[in-house]
Image (cartoon, rainbow, N blue to C red):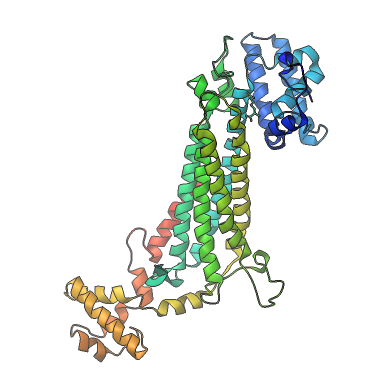
Amino acid sequence: MAQLWKGRFRKELAKETNDFNSSIKFDCRMFEEDITGSIAHATMLGAAGIIEQSEAEKITAELADILADIKSGRLEIDTEAEDIHTFVEGELTKRLGQTGKRLHTARSRNDQVALDIRMTLKKEIDEISGKLRELIGVLCDKAEENKGTIMPGYTHLQRAQPITFAHHLMAYAAMLCRDLDRLGDVSRRMNVLPLGSGALAGTTYPLDRHMVADLLGFDDVSSNSLDGVSDRDFCIELASALSLIMVHLSRFSEEIIMWCSWEFKFVELDDAFSTGSSIMPQKKNPDIAELVRGKSGRVFGDLMTLLTVMKGIALAYNKDMQEDKEAIFDAVDTVKMCLNAFTPMIETMTVLKDNMRNAAAKGFINATDCADYLVGKGLPFRDAYKATGELVAICIDKGLTLETLPIEEYKAVCDIFDEGVYDAINLEKCVNDRLVEGGPSKQSVEEQIIKARDYTAK
Ligand code: ARG
């Protein structure tokens, strides 16, 4: 297919150069945005009297037909074209002759591609935000069912203090709510129309940029034409927000993988979200979680690609910037794919409550509460801490827990103890007394669920 820039060249492009230069294989996914953007541009050209109104109408009608034809499969995108912009303009000219050639008045592919990427990514952000909302909803539902499911909370992967599974899940919901917020920020800053920047220096035509912005749902127009065509901050910001989503999904995946092991056995994944081994008949592997953890690397790589591509290029547009699309599309597609598999995996997993409760009963996770009990009886915390530490050491020697250690042993270490200590170290009580906002008590977790649900309803 012919290039748009033939005039000053005497030779055909070498085949290798053509393949190397072409971007249609990855920018063809923006065909709808490219055509919609062109319809808005032509509408404005007609309204501003830059081209004849009748010609503008012919162009917009034909562009709409081209769009419908691509969508229905009647028109195939020619992968020999240099890029999607060339293809659409070529097809329009094929159909309309001279009139089609008027579409590109007062426009460059530089501002056109900047527009197309913004429009494409705005849609992708909406889709990913929807998927995040779904996952947060699933976490809230699961938390609802597990407000009384006691489990050990960990620091250094050592049993630390009692929490509930609901509390643990809502920690991930909090992270994902921040991710949602970040995507909203990126989308808001992205929502600026670059069209009208031309190749780099704007244009002499009396464009109505605000009209195009309104037609395409942009909040504003870019303030400087050099920046308008060479800004890819929004790709980097999005890749960064997507990287954080992957950090969160990857940490969650790591926990799922641990919880599925025989050493923990806190959850069992549904068969539909697990795989087997070709040699070991007993195996049930958490491959989905492992893949999500692994795929985080791709998205971080995409972020690094974008940063590196952008860091050294002089203003304004340079062809290096064509590299933006493969990186950001890969990040977007990877996150969508991960969420598609991750959410139903969480939704269908079985929570092995007894195993969590049994693990919570070991490891002295109520030792802080034992010390707090002594503080309640007037002892300074440091002394209470030391006395409890001694009790833990005695328990370890005798193979007992704080619950099963006789009261005489308690009294021998510190005579303030009475039978009330057994109530104070009861795990359910330890959890449900932690009424502090953000804490693990039933009441606190209920508040967290309401907050997350409210947030995702926005
Ligand atoms: N395929 C190009 C890109 O993605 C479109 C812009 C081409 N502009 C140019 N001056 N060669 O960046």
Residue drawn 74% across the image and 30% down it: 18
Q: Which of 266 and 318 is in front in this view?
A: 318
Q: Tell whether 172 sits left or right of 383.
A: right
The total number of labels drawn is: 0
Coordinates of residue 394 in the picture (x, y in percent) = 29, 87
410 to 427, vertically: above or below: below
Name the residue at the right extreme.
74
Q: Quadrant of the rendered structure where residue 151 is?
A: bottom left
Coordinates of residue 108 in the picture (x, y in percent) = 63, 19
Residue drawn 64% across the image and 23% down it: 109
State which quarter of the image contains the N terminus.
top right
304 to 95, vertically: above or below: below
Q: Which of 306 and 375 is in front in this view?
A: 306
Q: Tell whether 101 sits left or right of 443.
A: right
Q: Tell whether 144 sits left or right of 78.
A: left
Can see residue 374? Answer: no
Residue drawn 69% across the image and 10% down it: 53
Coordinates of residue 349 in the picture (x, y in percent) = 59, 67
Can see residue 248? Answer: yes
Residue drawn 26% across the image and 85% down it: 419
Ligand 1 location (quadrant): top right
324 to 278, vertically: above or below: above
Q: Quadrant of the rendered structure where residue 38 is?
A: top right
Coordinates of residue 447 in the picture (x, y in percent) = 40, 57
Q: Tell whether 139 sits left or right of 381.
A: right
